[in-house]
Amino acid sequence: MGVREDLASLCEAFAEIHDLHAASGLLSWDQETYMPAKGVAGRAPALATLAGLSHEKLCAPRLGELIARLGAPSAAQDLSLEEQALVREARRDHERASKVPAAIVREVAEASSQALVAWQKARAASRFQDFAPHLARLVTLKRRTAEALGYAETPYDALLDEFEPGLTTSFLERLFASLRAELTPFVQEVLAAPKIDAGPVRRRYEPSRQLAFATAVARAMGFDFEAGRLDRAAHPFCSGIHQGDVRLTWRSSDDDLRPALYGVIHEAGHGLYEQGLPAAWARTPLGEACSYGIHESQSRLWENLVGRSRAFWSHFLPRLKEFFPGVAADLDVETMYRAVNEVTPSFIRTEADELTYNLHVVLRFELERDLFAGRLALEDLPSAWNDGMEALLGIRPGNDAEGLLQDIHWSMGSFGYFPSYTLGNLYAAQLFDAALSAIPDLEARLARGDFVPLREWLGAKVHARGRLLLARDLIRDVTEKEPGMGAFLTHARRKFGEIYGV
Ligand code: ZN
């Protein structure tokens, strides 16, 4: 067999695996949007079957042989750089999957489908004890997964690596320690300064008009509604079935504009990434997003560096007044800019301001790390959560819904995901600095509502490259700097220093 034939066979095999993932992605999206409550009895085993089938295909010995032949030094000369990257990423997926027994993969899929429904109910009733047995089962399954995958220092490393290849617990401990040391005194200064009036965003913005406004913003960002849609769900998320079918969800508050607006901007940031993945590599590992940290950098960049800027409101405040003539008529850009940048300790991570957001991630990281190291028992989790919130943010949740039941991730078994949010914040600041240098009139363009240059720049530098580079190499390549927290801290100090006068 020649190299070209092997490569064609590799792509064919991955196309089938991708199709199975697309099917389960759509079933999962449906489960969170339109599936009737009793549907879970059929949905959980269906998802388990699909997970089993794609795992089986991904572990197939024939796929291993193809990868071995294509990865041989003699084959490299016949492969382009992209094709070599494709083989590298195919090997990663194949080797990771091959280490985990099929039975665990199926059981995780089934358990998380059931856990999702249990979490939705437990959150509505604010009762952690109703969700705890599901969480216990998922932690056990994920610990067995980590043992099967192997790790250098601690089982949690194996879980982190799924979302950000090469990420380790010890690296995060150092990162979070310095981030906390840099951020905490600054947050304290900001909190001691005179309060910002968030009244302008806490008005009675009618939810269906909120949806219409947020949709207009997503459209202006360049999200293609012929290649995607937006539906209501308990938790905002983005599900990329294919670059021509990217599904966003939203939720709203009756008396606060922020959850729907910034939720949609965030998810549309993910959506632009999914719609901009390289079409030529669709249905191969190269046609997927680089890492979850890079994915979150796209959503957080649009949400914070664009959506919470003066430039954004220069353009969108007049639009807001058209959508809400009776509610927003008296507002000016400066008032709005300050209102959406109110810094205040809050319970819900997705609604946290830019400064305190990373502290929510620190809490989740420390709890997950201790859970998987066997230092924290599940029954102690609610009190550990509440103590942690108090230590980090000085507030104590009054119930489980605004405490440890707030996020969907644990019900999906996605332990190790949360650090992606902080990496995303750090990458986003660094990428936005690079965009400002590359597009000299960027701020003026954004203030005119012209998002095309930024979207095209991100498209060319990040989206269209799929998994061509590893996350750290991608950031280094695009920004010509090592990935770090410098850009984020500079941005945060400058922006909030000016707003709060500290
Ligand atoms: Zn996100």
Image (tube, rainbow, N blue to C red):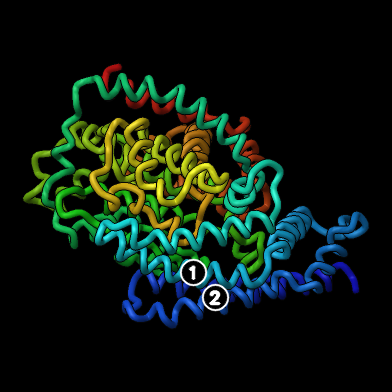
Mark 1 lies on residue: 111
Q: Residue at x 47, y 35 (%)?
A: 429
**Which three-letter amino acid code belongs to the residue tagged 2?**
Ala
Residue 111's place in the image compared with 125, above or below, is below
Drawn side of residue 183 relative to residue 338, left or right: right
Toward the right, the furthest residue is 74
Element carrying mark 2: helix
**Which three-letter amino acid code belongs to the residue tagged 1?**
Ala
Q: Quadrant of residue 441?
A: top left
Is the residue at mark 1 in contact range of ligand 1, meaning its CB lies under 8 Å from it?
Answer: no
Element carrying mark 1: helix
Tell me, for residue 48, which label it has, or none. 2
Residue 217's place in the image compared with 201, above or below, is below
Q: Position of residue 68 (x, y in %)?
A: 85, 63
Q: Position of residue 298 (x, y in %)?
A: 47, 47
Q: Residue at x 51, y 25 (%)?
A: 178
In front here: 414 or 304?
Answer: 414
Tell me, for residue 40, which label it has, or none. none
Q: Quadrant of residue 135?
A: bottom left
